[in-house]
Structures are given as C-alpha cells and as structure tokens.
Amino acid sequence: MEEKGRENGIAAMAACYQKFDPAAYLQYNYTPPRADFARKDSIVPWKLACLHRAFTEDVSGELLVDIGSGPTLYQVMSGCEVFNKLILTDFLEVNRQELRRWLQDEGGCSLDWT
C-alpha cells in the first residue's frame, strides 16, 4: 500500500510540474529588479560573481554536468571558460526546449542570455 501511495505522489508531482511556465519563471527571476546589474543588492549579479569565483578559483575539468538546469544558463556561464564540454539536463521538456531554442538560435526564446 505504501508503494502505491508513493507512486501516486510521484505522478501528482509530475502532473504539477507539467504546468511549469519557463517564460514566466525567467521573467520573474532574471529581469530587474532581481537581475538589475546597476544595483549592488541585486541577487543575479551576486550569484554570477559567486559562480565565476568558484569556477576560476576552485573548479575545472573536462566535463561539467548540470542536473536540473531548468530553463537557465547562468549557473554554467563561467564554467564555459574552464570546462571543455557542458551538459545541461532537466526533467521538463519545456525547459529543455527553452534552452534548445537559445542554443540553436531558433528565436522565440524567453530571455536573451547573450
């Protein structure tokens, strides 16, 4: 019985995530005020600085795998400088599509990462 409940919980969570909207997520989290590079207290510039420091001082290698990338690239941008290959993964097809549109320059991206 416990196994059946766990399966139902996983199915419910999967159904909930299928309603995820990458465009709304990116708009809310990666545009001002959260991503306001003119403000010193803005969260995104702080995150980028921390990740850049980690990748330039502590981490490097052949392959960087980001598990649960979501529709975002910020977490691996600095890694491009010190890793030869990057793999981004995500559970949701809509997030993978968002990344693919940007990577393949297909247009229709919700955020211009350049």
Image (tube, grey):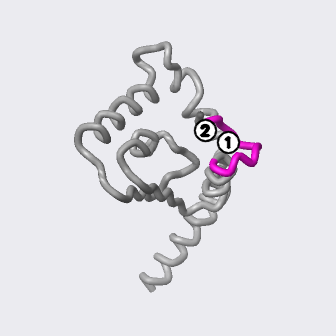
* In this rendering, position of residue 47 left or right of residue 112: left
Location of residue 54 by image quarter: top left
Q: Where in the figure is residue 111, as x and y percent of width and height?
A: 65, 36
In the image, is residue 69 part of the stretch drawn in magenta?
no
- The answer to whether the residues at label 2 and label 1 have Cβ atoms under 8 Å apart is yes
Task: Give the secondary structure at mark 2.
Answer: helix
Residue 74 vertical placement versus 86 (above, below): above
Q: Where in the figure is residue 30, as x and y percent of width and height?
A: 56, 32
Amino acid type for the residue under numbered disc 1: Ala
Q: Residue furthest bottom?
A: 1
- The N terminus is located in which quarter? bottom left
Residue 23 circle label? 1
In the image, is residue 109 part of the stretch drawn in magenta?
yes
Amino acid type for the residue under numbered disc 2: Leu
Q: Nearer the viewer, residue 78 or 110?
A: 78
Location of residue 40 by image quarter: top left
Residue 26 circle label? 2
Q: Nearer the viewer, residue 86 or 72?
A: 86
The stretch in magenta equals: 103-112
- How packed mark 2 is, by other alpha carbons closer than 10 Å (few <14, some 14-19, many 20 or more), is some
